[in-house]
Every structure is written in structure tokens, then in C-alpha cells.
Image (cartoon, helix red, strand yellow):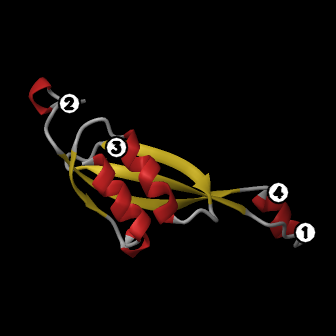
Amino acid sequence: MQKDGQKNKKKIVVIDATNLKGYGEGEWKVKMHGQSKRRTWHKVHLGIGLGGEIQTAKLTLNRVADCEVAPDLLNQIKSDIKTVAGDSGYDKEIVYQAITSVR
């Protein structure tokens, strides 16, 4: 939660994603019977502020690239953004354009 004095302060945001494993068939069944179905993976994309609070989030399928989600993540943040940091998955023109448009 933001204090009143910090509402209009520009934010520093770190964006990244992590995978979530989802199960189709139960792990026990696969172990016992050797049947293997494709496991489903999703990605959770997060934007974290300096205080460790989640500023923005989005859940996607695993085939969605990190850079494709960055514009939506940044547009979810209501205050001005001072700095954005991310790994090489975000080092793309689409992300630079998104950062420029939300500043």
C-alpha cells in the first residue's frame, strides 16, 4: 500500500517471469504406469517495486515471450515510471517503446 506522499512519485520497477507447472494426469499415475502426457506450463510475469510489492502481474501460456507481455505489464502501473529493469528477455524494441510511452 502506498502512503499519500508516494502516490505521485515515479516508480522503479523490475520485471521478470517464472514458470508454473500444471499437471494433466496425476504424478502418481505417471510414476506407476509409465504413461506420460504433456505437462502444461504457464508463465507468471511480475513487476516488482523497490519495496518488494507487486506492482503488476499477468499469467500467460509458456509460449508467450517475456518481451510480448512487457507493454501490458507497464500499462497496468498507474503512476509514472522512473526506471525499468529486466533480464535479456526484455532487451527488445517493443519493450523500449512501451517504456517510452508510459514515462
Mark in front: 1 vs 4: 4
| Sequence-earlier tag: 2 or 1 | 2
Mark on residue 100? none
Pointer 2 and pointer 4: residues touching (CB < 8 Å)? no
Where disc 3 sits, the SS reads strand
Estimate the spatial distance between the alpha carbons at disc 3 and disc 4, rounded to whole Å: 32 Å
Q: Residue at x 32, y 50 (%)?
A: 101
- Within 10 Å of disc 4 (Cα), the crowding (few <14, some 14-19, many 20+) is few
The amino acid sitting under disc 4 is Glu
Horizontal side, residue 39 vs residue 103: left or right: right
The alpha-carbon separation of the residues under discs 2 and 1 comes to: 52 Å
Q: Residue at x 87, y 73 (%)?
A: 34
- Of the image marks 3 and 2, the number of the one nearer the N terminus: 2
Residue under the point 79% across and 60% down: 28
Q: CA distance from mark 3 to mark 1?
A: 41 Å
- The residue lying toward the viewer, choosing from 65 and 30, is 65
Badge nearest the viewer, 2 or 1: 2
Q: Is residue 48 above or below residue 29?
A: above
Mark 3 neighbour class, 10 Å CA radius: few under 14, some 14 to 19, many 20 or more: some
Report, in whole angstroms, how far the alpha carbon at label 3 lies from the one at label 2. Answer: 12 Å
Q: Quadrant of the N terminus?
A: top left
Mark 1 = which residue?
A: 33
Give me the C-alpha separation between circle 1 and circle 4: 11 Å
Question: What amino acid type is highlighted by mark number 1?
Answer: His
Look at mark 3 in the image and give the residue it sits on. 54
Q: Which residue is mark 4?
A: 25
Quadrant of the image occupied by residue 79: top left
Q: Which mark is residue 2?
A: 2
Q: Is residue 24 left or right of residue 91?
A: right
Q: Mark 4 or mark 1, which is nearer the start of the sequence?
A: 4
Kind of residue at disc 3: Ile
